[in-house]
Image (cartoon, grey):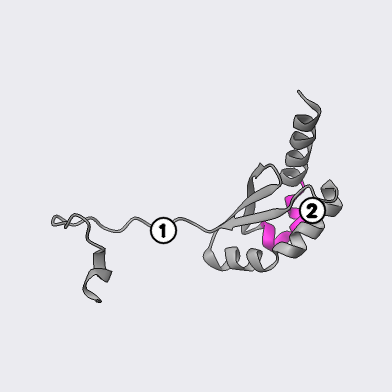
Amino acid sequence: MAESGWAAAVATGSVFAQWARIVGPDLAAHTAPERLDGAELVVAADSTAWATQLRLLAGELIRRLDLELGQGAIRRVRVHGPGAPAGPRGQWRVRGGRGPRDTYG
């Protein structure tokens, strides 16, 4: 494994293993790191409210990750909430329709 690949593996393992310590127990109970794409950390939240909270704290999170991994290891935190539930599919559908929003102008 190349030196940079080894360093990336160590960084990923450190973030994943130490997530609760880095972000705190409250945030860790509702968020989890998914992957590390270069210098971008992708985090999943279990609700849109927690996703918004983590987005607001992204700067502080990057500072904490700098202390853990070294300056500049993580440059961006991308947060996503849960996916939208699939709506019920009716018998009649219009190709290209926008669903309930279709009648609002």
**Left or right of residue 97, residue 46 in this image:** right
Name the residue rendered at 62%, 55% in the picture.
78
Please identify, in this view, whether the residue under mark 2 or under mark 1 is nearer the observer. 2
Name the residue rendered at 26%, 58% in the picture.
88
Residue 84 location, x and y as percent? 41, 58
Check residue 76 in the rendering and tell me which mark sits there, or answer none.
none
Residue 62: in magenta span? no
Q: CA distance from mark 2 to mark 1?
A: 30 Å
Say which amino acid is labelled 1. Answer: Ala
Q: Which residues are magenta?
A: 18-28
| Residue to which mark 1 is pinned | 84
Secondary structure state at the residue bearing disc 2? helix
Residue 83 location, x and y as percent? 45, 55
Name the residue rendered at 85%, 48% in the picture.
70
Check residue 65 in the rendering and tell me which mark sits there, or answer none.
2
Say which amino acid is labelled 2. Answer: Leu
Residue 11 location, x and y as percent? 77, 41
Q: Residues within 10 Å of mark 2 (few under 14, many from 20)?
A: many
